[in-house]
Amino acid sequence: RNGMPNRVGTGAEVFLDVSIGGLKPGRIIIELDTRACPKTCENFRALCTGEKGFGYKNSTFHRVVPNFVAHGGDFTHADGTGGRSIYGARFEDEGFSLRHVCPGIVSMANNGPNANGSQFFITLVNTNWLDGKNVAFGRVVEGFDVVKQIEAVGTFKGKTTAAVMITDCGEHSPVGTAKLTAQTSPAASSA
């Protein structure tokens, strides 16, 4: 798998359906390591389902730097200055046992220690200099070809050449059926 992480059966799976410039290249499936980072994983899972009344659906990957990261999750400002967690504005670092050692690692973006909200990134290469600074909590287990298509519209300064949007997201069953999505969440339908 070219250095890509494999499923290790450590927790829940979520999906992100994306569009790039209005085209829908497919689905990214992320395995969450709930044993290593249960609070961080629950935050990400709930933001994918939208069950708290807010989350990732219709948000963007606002910063994509080739050979580095695809950065998204700012659903309040879409520019890297906003977002929030299900626990409040920010929550503490949960641990640094998972490392940024290959493409496809999913990690919290922050602006310093204990400043996790909703912003996250997917590594496009080994980014081990982020170990101990950003909480890695998952791995892309399917759809890395979609991540590479996102990378293709990135620039050195991070501004994308085409809009990259999360059009739907939610829990994913490893057998292939969605459990709870932002479309089917009770909170989403009451909004």
Image: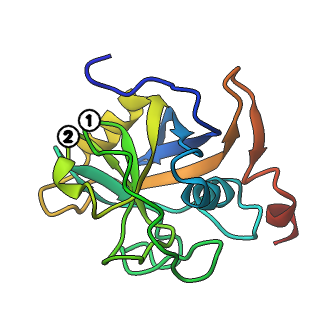
Residue 99: name its quadrant: top left
In the picture, which quadrant includes the C terminus? bottom right
Whether pointer 2 and pointer 1 mark residues with C-beta atoms closer than 8 Å, the reply is: yes
Give the residue drawn at x 66%, y 25%.
Answer: 174
Q: Earlier in the sequence, mark 2 or mark 1?
A: 1
Give the residue drawn at x 75%, y 68%.
Answer: 52
Q: Secondary structure at mark 1?
A: loop
Residue 71: name its quadrant: bottom left
Please determine whether, in this image, residue 47 is positioned above or below residue 171. Answer: below
Residue 167 circle label = none
Q: Position of residue 11 (x, y in %)?
A: 62, 38
Q: Secondary structure at mark 2?
A: loop
Give the residue drawn at x 64%, y 76%.
Answer: 87
Q: Position of residue 53 (x, y in %)?
A: 75, 70
Q: CA separation, marks 2 and 1?
A: 4 Å
Left or right, 132 with reference to 135: left
Please determine whether, in this image, residue 68 is positioned above or below residue 7. Answer: below
Q: Position of residue 70 (x, y in %)?
A: 32, 51
Please determine whether, in this image, residue 76 is positioned above or below residue 158. Answer: below
Left or right, 184 with reference to 35: right
Q: Residue furthest top?
A: 1
Residue 13: name its quadrant: top right
Residue 102 circle label = 1
**Amino acid beneath label 2:** Asn
How many residues crowd around disc 2 within 10 Å: few (fewer than 14), some, or many (20 or more)?
A: some
Q: Position of residue 133 (x, y in %)?
A: 28, 64
**Amino acid beneath label 1:** Cys
Residue 126 circle label = 2
